[in-house]
Structure formats: C-alpha cells, structure tokens
Image: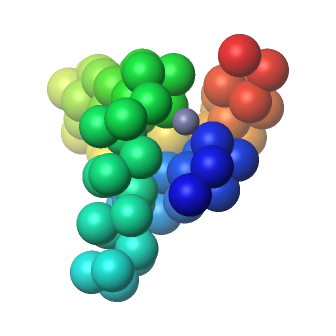
Amino acid sequence: MNCNEAVEKLWQYLDRELDGEAVVEVERHLQECRECFSRAEFEQRLRALLRRSCGCEQAPAALRDRLHRLLRMF
Ligand SMILES: [Zn+2]
C-alpha cells in the first residue's frame, strides 16, 4: 500500500467502515510511514475534540471536506 491508498482508506478506517483485511493493510502502512501516522493522529485528535465540544462523532460535512482537502496538501 502506498501513501495515496492509505490516505484514501484512512477516513474509512477511522470510521470503522473497512473490513478486517483492509484494516490490517492500513495499520501496517501507519506503522511504517510517519507521515500517514501523523495524519491519522491528527484526525483522531480532531474527532476527540469534536466529541468533547459538541457531543458528535462527525464534523459537519463542510468542515470535514475542508479539513480533508487541507490534509491532502501536506
Ligand atoms: Zn504513508
């Protein structure tokens, strides 16, 4: 798995929408790749923050889109 594939799957991974095999692949990439690991960390922290501040798991769609676009520029 390369970084593009990992990033594509990262959101689904964090939403727990991937099947077992894909989860293993993403986790393997995160262990090997600092860059993607940082992205995953950032997204997880963001979710924790949202959960605390508004009680919702998901950012509003517009905010989410903006953040995803921002993350892809890294
Ligand atoms: Zn990567």
* Residue plotted at (70% across, 47% down): 4
For the N terminus, the quadrant is bottom right
Q: Is residue 34 visible?
A: yes
Q: Residue shown at 32%/67% (left/top)?
A: 23
* Side of 69 where 2 appears, left or right: left
In the shown orientation, is residue 24 left or right of residue 73? left
Residue at image location 71% in from the left, 16% down from the top? 74
Q: Position of residue 36 (x, y in %)?
A: 49, 31
How far from the left and from the top, in percent, is residue 48? Answer: 24, 29
- The residue at 30%/52% (across/down) is 27
Q: Position of residue 38 (x, y in %)?
A: 42, 20
Q: Quadrant of residue 64?
A: top right
Q: As displayed, is residue 26 above or below residue 16? A: above
Q: Quadrant of residue 21?
A: bottom left
| Left or right, residue 73 beside residue 16 | right
Q: Can you say whether 37 is above or below 19 in the image?
A: above
The image shows residue 69 at horizontal and vertical percentages of: 78, 32
Q: Is residue 61 above or below residue 12?
A: above
Q: Quadrant of residue 13?
A: bottom left
Number of marks drawn: 0
Residue 11 is at least partly visible in this image:
no
Outermost residue toward the top?
Answer: 74
Ligand 1, image quadrant it occupies: top right
